[in-house]
Amino acid sequence: MSDEATYFENVRPVDSVRGRVIRTRWLRHLIAFLLVAGPGLIVMEADNDAGAVSTYVQAGAQYGTHLLWIMLLLLPITYFVQEMVVRLGIATGQGHAAMIYRRFGKWWGRFSLFDLLLVNFLTLVTEFAAIALAVDHMGVSPYFGVPLAATGLILLVLSGGYLRWERITICLCLLDLTWLVLALFVHPQMHRVIHDTLIPHVPPGGITAELAFLVVGIVGTTIAPWQLFFQQSCVADKRLRFKDLKWARLDTFLGGVFTVIVGGCMMIAGNAAKVHSLEFLDPAKLAVDIGGIFGPFVKYGILFLMINAAVLGTTAVSLASSWAYGEVRGWPHSLQLPLKEAPGFYLVYIFCILAAAGLVLIPNAPLQLIILSVQVLAGLVLPSAIIFLQLLLNDREVLGEEWMNKRWNNIINWTIVILLFALSLLLAAQVMLPGLFPTSGPS
Amino acid sequence: MVRLNRNNKPRIGNMADYEKLTALRKSFDPDLVVHPLDDLPEKKRETDHLAPMKMTLSVRISLVTLRAYLILMGFMLVYHVLDIAGLFGHRGG
């Protein structure tokens, strides 16, 4: 007897699904949202990874709270981009890499996959570099801390299906609320914070190459290529239904709000270094420096949250790679499947983690070169990834009239694409031709 | 519990199966809340039969421009990385 026949013979209207009847409207909606929520929060908060911590804290250390308004501006941009991915994932039930392969052919499919895997791997190296840095400042050897983190990350996906992975990852995301406590601990001027968040302005010193670079870095770290692939695959793996779209959108929006607030708190923590005239070298050093003023809670809080950010980023980025590779190769690729039924999917995940962790532990590895390459590559890949997304969202054959982009979607999204293209060009030009722009502000 | 096939899709055979499932779903209490992973499979947009999309002129121009941009930037990046690594000799140790 076939599986299908078995399935239908066993189906009974009463016991064929596990669920709960809830008569109270608001409670029913709340439970429905909580069941659907996860991919949006995770993709947004995992983007506050080690690179983001470094960028936001540096922005605070160099420009105080003057760049907070950029975070607010990025909220609608990230939401609009990720909402398209959610729609595509729910409508097709397939991942992003699979859709690119199917609709744009092998050449573009391989090109996109290669870009994604390369940028993702380099990003993973930066995540583990941050873990090594943080544990070192906590008095723990990186040769112990990095393998421990890698082992934990592997066990996270091997230990029991999508739901367990999602619940643990959401808990890690919520740990980032500690950034709010840290931000309050360093006593920011609240009226200044509110002003700088709501009123766009150029920081004192004017527009310089350093400022432009940092702004591009903030944009680049807030919207990353892996996010597109990750959320669509995650939505497909969770098998979200058409009726879940409104909750998935809300999940994505609230995830964006959460991420922006946490990112803003990182800037405020960095601002403490500026207020106390401390030099910024890296976030771990900054944690030690401002910890000397505000106490061990701030020091260990920042170091611990650096590790948390890197762990979150690592699991999401590695999964984006293994989902995408599995989709393109036609391998089984689901966290719902055990290791023996999806060996390729899990091996890609494990390989990414072990290789990146191993590279970080090699003495004198060119980590700075890798970090530089990540910034540029991510900047290069992002606009092209969004163009594919935009084309797919206008694909009537794939989505039909009901789910494809409306005219207003396209106006907003093409504006975002043009903006990101301009910023990626600026980033690439600044990194590759550092003498192109003046390096100091008007005197 | 719905089982998955090797491509992470529910083990449902054809359109008639989906019609049965749709009818089944309609028989449920409208106030029933079910986790997506525990729910009956639903019919998604059919994409398996689709070939690569037919490119309009604007799409073709966009992608060719994108290809040129990525290749150019890729070469610039490789040059820059090799330069930093000291391969061209003018960056002393």
Image (tube, grey):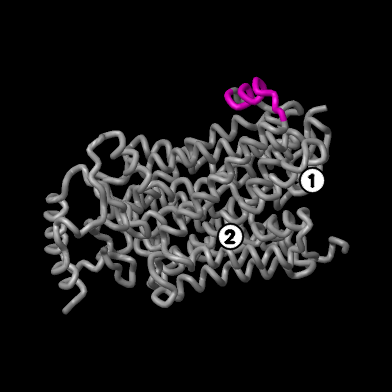
Tell me residue A196's x, y (percent). 64, 25
Q: Secondary structure at mark 2?
A: helix
Circle on res. A119: 2
Tell me residue B1's x, y (percent). 26, 63
The answer to whether one can see residue A186 in this image is: yes
Above/below status of A356 relative to A84: below
Residue for point 42% across, 64% down:
A161
Quarter of the figure with residue A247: top left
Q: Which residues are magenta?
A: A187-198
Residue for point 67% across, 70% down:
A358
Kind of residue indicated by mark 2: Val
Quarter placement of the N terminus of chain A: bottom left
Kind of residue indicated by mark 1: Val
**Does the magenta-highlighted stretch encompass residue A334?**
no
Above/below status of A194 relative to B52: above
Of pointers 2 and 1, the one earlier in the residue sequence: 2
Residue for point 68% across, 30% down:
A65
The answer to whether one can see residue A428 in this image is: no
